[in-house]
Amino acid sequence: MNYTGSQIADITNSKIIGDGELIIKNIAFDSRIIYSTKNTAFIAINTSKNSGEKFIESAIDRGINVIISEHHYSQFENITWIIVENSVEFLQKLAKYHFENSHIKSIGITGSNGKTILKRMVISMSLE
């Protein structure tokens, strides 16, 4: 993935606040395991059980400067925000767009048994 904040906002019908020219290559959803902040946005995923928005400050403390959230928190200065209506639907829209507009080959492995071993076999064959 390699988009500007403005491109992501356009793709997902979201609103951008801040520097829309920042490049986003990765999206982190767990503030505890942010290893690199370069070109990484943090998405605050809200579900019926939990709100990712309570981890925004932690992500910013780790050095994230692009936040994808359903709400804008103006107390955090110098942060670029992508404001979305629904964080899960945002991810679905972005993934769909990215998949449809990149030249990635994909296969689906389904069934009740053998998916893991088949996946490993396919990977080992593709590495040869």
Image (cartoon, rainbow, N blue to C red):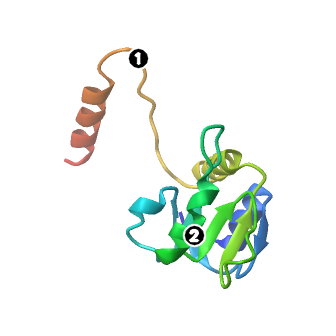
* Residue shown at 75% from the left, 57% from the top: 84
The amino acid beneath tag 1 is Gly
Q: Position of residue 15 (x, y in %)?
A: 80, 66
Q: Position of residue 104 (x, y in %)?
A: 49, 50
Q: Position of residue 38 (x, y in %)?
A: 47, 77
Q: Earlier in the sequence, mark 2 or mark 1?
A: 2
**Residue 22 shown left or right of residue 1 in the figure:** right
Q: Nearer the viewer, residue 31 or 86?
A: 31
The answer to whether any part of residue 2 appears in the image is no
* Residue shown at 61% from the left, 73% from the top: 66
**Residue 10 shown left or right of residue 116 in the figure:** right
The amino acid beneath tag 2 is Glu
* Residue shown at 64% from the left, 41% from the top: 47
As drawn, the label of residue 111 is: 1
Q: Is the residue under label 1 in contact with that under label 2 (CB below 8 Å)?
A: no
Q: Residue furthest top?
A: 112
User: Dot 1: within a 10 Å radius of its alpha carbon, few (fewer than 14), some, or many (20 or more) residues?
Assistant: few
* Mark 2 element type: helix
Q: Nearer the viewer, residue 28 or 24?
A: 28
Q: Which residue is mark 2?
A: 57
